[in-house]
């Protein structure tokens, strides 16, 4: 029996279906599961754990050769989490909460990958995961009411439930630079960094991109390279992480009160326990008092953006904290011209993903680091020896693309998902993603998305949102089982109302003012739609609970 047949049932193909192009009649056999999950990061592993509790036969397909998702792929120098370690973890096992020890306040990639492997081993999850396998098509067969899934390894399986746990930031974005095929050196995308590392000793290195990944990688690359050229199109706000080794007393106190901390995170805006927003505007206090408040919060990036209640909605209040941060940048960077290039002015603070760093701005004081402004002088072409902008040519031995991802929708589109009536998901979403609660989309029965568009997802602590989604999905499947129902599908009117609500909440903030990857602005041709739900983790959880309590209101349930 092949690996794909383990824990499933082999069935012979009985004929054609409505999805003729993907479920053609042939003589091959296929394996039938209760559920197929795509992705073996934290989301996929926890979903597998919960489905196994229900007694469902489940197969997880994972592109990588190991578990961890984001933390399997992103091994670039300096990679680490930007949520506090004690909160960036799974809470479903109180025993695991107590036994696992984090080495730093903000854990590095190696620790996070190690934690993912601990989860897989502790709960014996690997036997249900097929590694090195990508889903190439997932088609809903209306005749059988099942999903037909094919992979790049030649697997053909069917499942009653199809659950995507591929992550919001897993579809890499390598811009189609002219001349890239002519480059004679080595080039890497940060999310596909070799596990064995890259020796940059004595090398001239160019890095393109100064988002969260670039800001983490640049200080480390500068320590290794003979010379580092940073090609910056858009400056981003970055705040100090003040990362340090985990304080044993802090860890002990936190573990003693874990249930309280977890509940506060679940009820919060961003899925992390944060100070309550004070009931006052940044404009309601004197300049002196406001700066004192900002200074007191400077060591905690979450606290800084929570100092007043109108930073995300009032342009004047936002500009006050933005200028405070710009002044900090000017104090750190010795060259005034470089400091001004690094000080963002084209978007409100917080409307692009806030970055946290360790000595990022100080890195530009090094003699072996050059900041190149490619907003004023764009990159024209990659050359055999490096790259050329409209103003100059740069010779490098290594190019690093810190150019991010086709966020949120990209991972779903790459699976070739087709719903009822042969409608591809990408076609349905051609004007932007449309979901109900970010977990389901009309026309795609028994398909669930973990942290999909229209949910807090990337605006939250991911482990908090992952667990909430997995628990909700599992409860929905259990409800179907207990009531002898065959399928659940979002209703069009409920989906329309939710999309309107997501847009309404987003448009009430400053977030839509930025050309961010939240809006799909980093991908040419992608519709400009604010994809995550900004209404808050706590409010979102309450809405999801209400829907479930009302017998899955807004969903069509079929026998």
Image (cartoon, grey):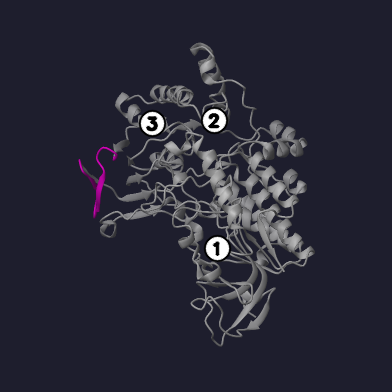
Residue 285 locus on image (x, y percent): 54, 14
Q: Quote the CA–CA distance across marks 1 and 3.
A: 39 Å
Give the labeled residue for mark 3: 344
Q: Where does label 1 land, which residue? A: 65
**Image depth: mark 1 or mark 3 in front:** 3
Q: Nearer the viewer, mark 2 or mark 1?
A: 2
Residue 517 drawn in magenta:
no
Q: Residue at x 46, y 62 (%)?
A: 427
Image coords of residue 342 (percent x, y): 36, 31
Label 2 to label 1: alpha-carbon separation: 35 Å
Choose the circle earlier in sequence order: 2 or 1.
1
Quadrant position of residue 130 = bottom right
Task: Name the residue at 72% across, 38% down.
Answer: 263
Residue 383 lies within the magenta run? yes
Residue 98 left/right relative to 305? right
Front-lying residue, 94 or 65: 94
Q: Tag 2: Cα neighbours inside 10 Å, few (<14), some, or many (≥20)?
A: some
Task: Name the image quarter holding residue 419.
Answer: bottom right
Furthest residue in direction front, as rendered: 493
**Tag 2, which secondary structure?**
helix
Q: Quadrant of residue 389?
A: top left
The residue carrying mark 2 is: 301
Q: CA distance from mark 3 to mark 2?
A: 17 Å
Magenta extent = 374-391
Above or below, 482 against 102 in this view is: below
Would residue 16 be found to the left or right of residue 1 on screen? Answer: left
Residue occupying the point 50% across, 62% down = 425
In the picture shown, does residue 249 fall above or below 128? above
């Amino acid at each position: 029996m092949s690996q794909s047949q383990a824990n499933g049932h082999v069935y012979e193909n009985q004929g054609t279906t409505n999805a003729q192009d993907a479920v053609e009649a042939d003589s091959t056999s296929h394996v039938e599961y209760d559920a197929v999950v795509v992705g073996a990061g934290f989301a996929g592993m926890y979903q597998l754990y919960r489905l196994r509790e229900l007694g469902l036969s489940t197969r997880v397909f994972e592109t990588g050769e190991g578990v961890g998702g984001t933390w399997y792929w992103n091994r670039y120098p300096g990679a680490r989490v930007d949520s506090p370690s004690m909160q960036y973890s799974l809470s479903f096992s109180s025993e695991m909460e107590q036994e696992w020890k984090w080495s730093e306040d903000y854990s590095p990639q190696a620790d996070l990958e190690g934690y993912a492997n601990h989860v897989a081993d502790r709960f014996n999850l690997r036997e249900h995961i097929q590694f090195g396998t990508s889903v190439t098509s997932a088609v809903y067969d209306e005749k059988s009411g099942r999903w037909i899934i094919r992979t790049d390894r030649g697997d053909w399986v069917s499942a009653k439930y199809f659950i995507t746990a591929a992550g919001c930031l897993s579809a890499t974005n390598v811009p189609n630079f002219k001349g890239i095929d002519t480059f004679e050196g080595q080039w890497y995308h940060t999310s596909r960094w070799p596990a064995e590392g890259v020796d940059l000793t004595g090398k001239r290195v160019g890095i393109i991109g100064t988002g969260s990944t670039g800001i983490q990688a640049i200080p480390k690359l500068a320590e290794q390279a003979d010379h580092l050229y940073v090609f910056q199109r858009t400056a981003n706000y970055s705040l100090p992480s003040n990362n340090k080794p985990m304080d044993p007393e802090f860890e002990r106190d936190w573990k003693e009160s874990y249930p309280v901390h977890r509940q506060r995170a679940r009820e919060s805006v961003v899925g992390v326990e944060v100070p309550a927003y004070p009931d006052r505007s940044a404009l309601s206090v004197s300049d002196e008092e406001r700066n004192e408040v900002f200074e007191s919060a400077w060591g905690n990036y979450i606290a800084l953006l929570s100092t007043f209640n109108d930073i995300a909605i009032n342009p004047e209040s936002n500009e006050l904290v933005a200028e405070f941060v710009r002044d900090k940048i000017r104090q750190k960077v010795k060259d005034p011209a470089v400091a001004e290039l690094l000080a963002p002015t084209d978007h409100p603070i917080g409307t692009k993903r806030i970055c946290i760093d360790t000595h990022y701005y100080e890195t530009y004081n090094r003699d072996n680091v050059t900041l190149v402004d490619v907003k004023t002088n764009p990159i024209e072409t990659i050359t055999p020896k490096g790259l050329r902008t409209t103003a100059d040519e740069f010779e490098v031995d290594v190019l690093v693309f810190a150019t991010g991802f086709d966020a949120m929708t990209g991972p779903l589109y790459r699976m070739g998902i087709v719903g009822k009536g042969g409608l591809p998901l990408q076609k349905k979403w051609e004007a932007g993603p449309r979901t109900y609660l970010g977990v389901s989309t009309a026309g795609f029965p028994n398909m669930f998305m973990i942290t999909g568009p229209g949910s807090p997802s990337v605006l939250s602590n991911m482990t908090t949102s992952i667990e909430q989604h997995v628990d909700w999905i599992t409860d929905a499947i259990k409800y179907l089982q207990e009531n002898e129902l065959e399928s659940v599908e979002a209703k069009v009117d409920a989906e329309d109302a939710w999309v309107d609500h997501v847009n309404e909440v987003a448009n009430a903030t400053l977030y839509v003012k930025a050309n961010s990857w939240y809006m799909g602005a980093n991908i040419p041709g992608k519709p400009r739609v604010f994809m995550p739900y900004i209404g808050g983790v706590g409010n979102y959880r309450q809405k999801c609970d209400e829907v479930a309590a009302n017998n899955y209101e807004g969903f069509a349930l079929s026998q």
